[in-house]
Amino acid sequence: AYASMASAFLKKGELELSIQACRTALGLTANLPETLYILGLALILKWEALRSPNVEGAAGMLEEAISSCQKSICLKPDLSETHNLMGTAYEYSGKPDLAEAEFLTALKLKPELTTAHLNLALTYFHRKQYEKSAYHLRRILEINPSSGIGIEIMRAVFEKTKRYDMLK
């Protein structure tokens, strides 16, 4: 019941209530990979809302999100969304190599996961690895041709490189 409540709270944007419901559910039954995922997601969304590592407890939120994702993966290693979420937490924690590895794992498990392609495209864009970024953007647009974010980032890659061949 608490796990369902956590999901419902998350959908409503009630992050603190979702986090509390997850912690209660996990206190009763620790082996709930989906609840661990929801906890990680709620913590990352809360961190994003604060958008400052200087806020008291912000670093702890990311550490708990990573821990929650790791536990979820131990219980159910084939959850591509959990690998992608852990990659996001690593990225926010300043661990881009670990983030990249998790995004790639997510894509091995689910090649059409556009959020993992987007995360890799952004990772490579920030590293100035524009060809790799463009590859993942093309994949997003193959999967979802109307993806506004894919088109916008592809435009940014073109602006940086002036290479038409990356658009193909």
Image (cartoon, rainbow, N blue to C red):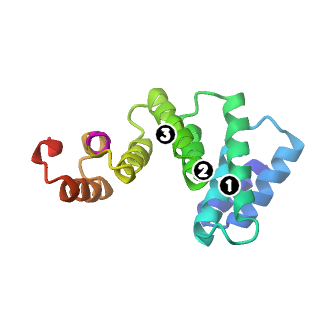
Q: Residue 100 got which mark?
A: 3
Is residue 39 at least partly visible in the picture? no
Measure the alpha-carbon separation of dots 3 and 2: 11 Å
The residue wearing badge 2 is 89
Q: Earlier in the sequence, mark 3 or mark 1?
A: 1
Is 88 placed left or right of 76 in the picture?
A: left
Element assignment for label 1: helix
Q: Residue at x 39, y 43 (%)?
A: 114
The magenta stretch is 131-137
Measure the alpha-carbon separation of dots 3 and 1: 17 Å
Q: Residue at x 67, y 67 (%)?
A: 14
Percent position of residue 132, x then y = 31, 40
Is 34 placed left or right of 79 in the picture?
A: right
Residue furthest left in the image: 164
Are dots 2 and 1 in contact, CB under 8 Å? Answer: yes
Residue furthest front in the image: 128
Q: Residue 27 got which mark?
A: none
Image: 62 above or below 96: below
Image: 146 above or below 78: below
**In the rendered structure, does residue 92 fall within the stretch colored magenta?**
no
Q: Earlier in the sequence, mark 2 or mark 1?
A: 1
Are dots 3 and 2 in contact, CB under 8 Å? Answer: no
Element assignment for label 3: helix
Please state which of residues 57 and 128 is positioned toward the viewer in this rendering: 128
Name which residue type carries label 3: Glu
Around disc 1, counting alpha carbons within 10 Å, would you say few (fewer than 14), some (14 to 19), or many (20 or more)? many
Q: Residue at x 58, y 65 (%)?
A: 48
